[in-house]
Every structure is written in structure tokens, then in C-alpha cells.
Image (cartoon, grey):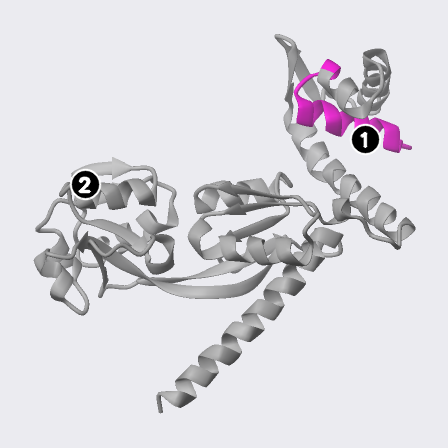
Amino acid sequence: MDITMAEIRAFNAVVEQGNFSRAAQSLGVSQPAITAQMQKLEGRFDTQIMERNHGGIKLTDLGKRLYKITQQYQDLETLIHQLANDDLTARNRDIQVATSSPLLFLPLTVEFRKLYPDANVKVVNGTTEECKAMLLAREVDIGMFPVEDGNPELSKLSFHTHKLVAIVPVEHSIAKLDAVSVDELIRHPLIFTTKGAITQDFVDQAFASKGHFPEPNICLDGRFETCHAVHLGLGIGFAFVEDVPKDEGLAQVPIKEKPNETTEHICWLRSRSNVQGIRDFVDMALEKCSEKYTQEKFNSKNHI
């Protein structure tokens, strides 16, 4: 089965653009040229790889499996282009980043722009699961979120560990505590976040560890909305320390029950480790982690 690069490019473009006409525009060819390549590709399989409906397309199970493979050819073309052009242009370093903790990770993107001022950096915010899905689908190049062990497709770099905290007004009685138990928190109105967000997963587990399964007073999508709701007296919110901005009107009180801390990672697809922008971003992050570790070690020694 001698599938050509032209067929693969056409197929990838149709999937990414959603129909044949936009795929043709993206590749700078005619729509009949895309149709011809797709007919050749589909003729190599015994079953359909996509269904056409209402001017769009929908991949079959076979088509989804094929696309997971053909996406890698785009990286191959990128690597060949980099090899053929020793004088790397800014375009080689254009990256897209997905993060569930923008306040923690945005300074890294600023540092990357300082190193490569002509590179384009696009940042997308989402839940951990949303960011992971985008990374695995190659919709972004770098992920910044907590990663569990056991996914052979991902490489990761530990960047920062922070604790789960309750967010309360500074005048609240809980604000005076060094740490708070869920046994105390359950007596108050609670503000929860979106299901699927790692923060809410940790909150649920902390309450469940003491046999509590509370219903929240209100559910909100984002951390900024949560902080605003706390200010308005709607209840107690939850977040990891570095995920909320400093606010003189709010106190962050650590949760006693475990799990009460998470490690944020910089992660990327192992198969894309040699793509220039990804490699440069990871190298920069490694240097920052080294500087951070050295500073923490220095501070620790000075406290002894």
C-alpha cells in the first residue's frame, strides 16, 4: 500500500479544516485536486474513513485511527524543513501552549518571548482534561498541567508543587487558622468549580476522606469568578495556591486532609521532542527549573 505524502496532506487538511473546500484553500490547491487525492486514499481501504454530511465531514473509527497516525507526518515534514534550513527562522519556534494554571505558567511564555522575540506564542486556558486532550490531539505543542504517571506518549518536566487551599474573606473566622479540616468547612456555604477540573477532584476527595459529600452553594467555571463570589459572601472557594492572584481582601488557608497538593508539569508528546519550538521551550524551562532549585536550596540553607 503506497500511500503518498500528497494523500496524507489532503486527508489531514480535510480533517483539520472540516470540509474539502477549506482544505483546498489551506493547501493552495483546487478542490478537485483534494477530491482526487481523497478518492485515491479511500480506495486503499475496504471500509469508509469518513462520512460527508451538510457540507462537512465526520471521521469513522478507522478514519480516527488513521488520523492519529498521519498527524505524525506533519512533524516529519517540520523536522526535514529544519534540517534543510540551518538558519532557523522565527517560524520554526512558533508554539501553541495549553495550560490549566495560567498565573503560574505565563511568566515562562514571557521568558520564551524574550529569548525569541519574533516567535509567535499562543496560549489556551482550560481544565487539565481539556489541555491534555488538546496536547494528545496535537492541537497544541506544549501542555502545562498536572500529569499522572503511566502515559507513554508524554514526556514531562516537574515544574512546581503547590497546596490546596480554602479561600475566605480576611475577616472570616477560618482566616485565622494555620490549616482547616473539611469537618469545619462543611458547616459553611461552599463554592465548587467545574467537574473535570483537577481542583474540584482534589476537593471532592478531601471531603470524601471524612465521609462528606456536600452540595455546593454555587458552582462556577473559573478561579477569578470564584474569588469574586467569595468577596460577595457567597461561600468558601477552593484553589491551588499559585492559581489565584494575591488579594488583600482574601485569605488562603491550607486544607488538612489529603490529597492536598499537586505537582504542575510541563509536558509534550515524546514523538515530537525534536521539533524546534518544543525543544527550545523545554530547554528554557529546564534552565528555569535549575535556577529555581538553586534559589530554593540557597534559601533553605539560610534558614538553618
As displayed, is residue 70 above or below residue 291?
above
In the picture of the structure, the residue carrying the numbered disc 1 is: 8
Name the spot of residue 213 as percent of width and height, x first: 18, 47
Name the spot of residue 123 as percent of width and height, x first: 55, 43
Report the side of 230 relative to 262 (left or right): left
Report how far apart the C-alphas of labels 1 and 2 lie in the structure: 49 Å
Report the side of 269 relative to 202 (left or right): right
In the picture of the structure, the residue carrying the numbered disc 2 is: 216
Name the spot of residue 175 as percent of width and height, x first: 15, 61
Q: Are marks 1 and 2 in contact (CB under 8 Å)?
A: no
Q: Which residues are magenta?
A: 1-21
Q: Residue at x 48, y 78 (%)?
A: 295
Q: Secondary structure at mark 1?
A: helix
Q: Which quadrant, please, contains the N terminus?
A: top right
Q: Three-letter amino acid code at disc 1?
A: Ile
Q: Residue at x 46, y 41 (%)?
A: 126
Q: Residue at x 20, y 37 (%)?
A: 218
Q: Residue at x 52, y 65 (%)?
A: 158
Q: Main secondary structure of the magenta part?
A: helix
**Residue 107 on the magenta segment:** no
Query: Dot 2 surroundings within 10 Å: few (below 14), some, or many (20 or more)?
Result: some
Report the side of 228 relative to 120 (left or right): left
Q: Secondary structure at mark 2?
A: loop
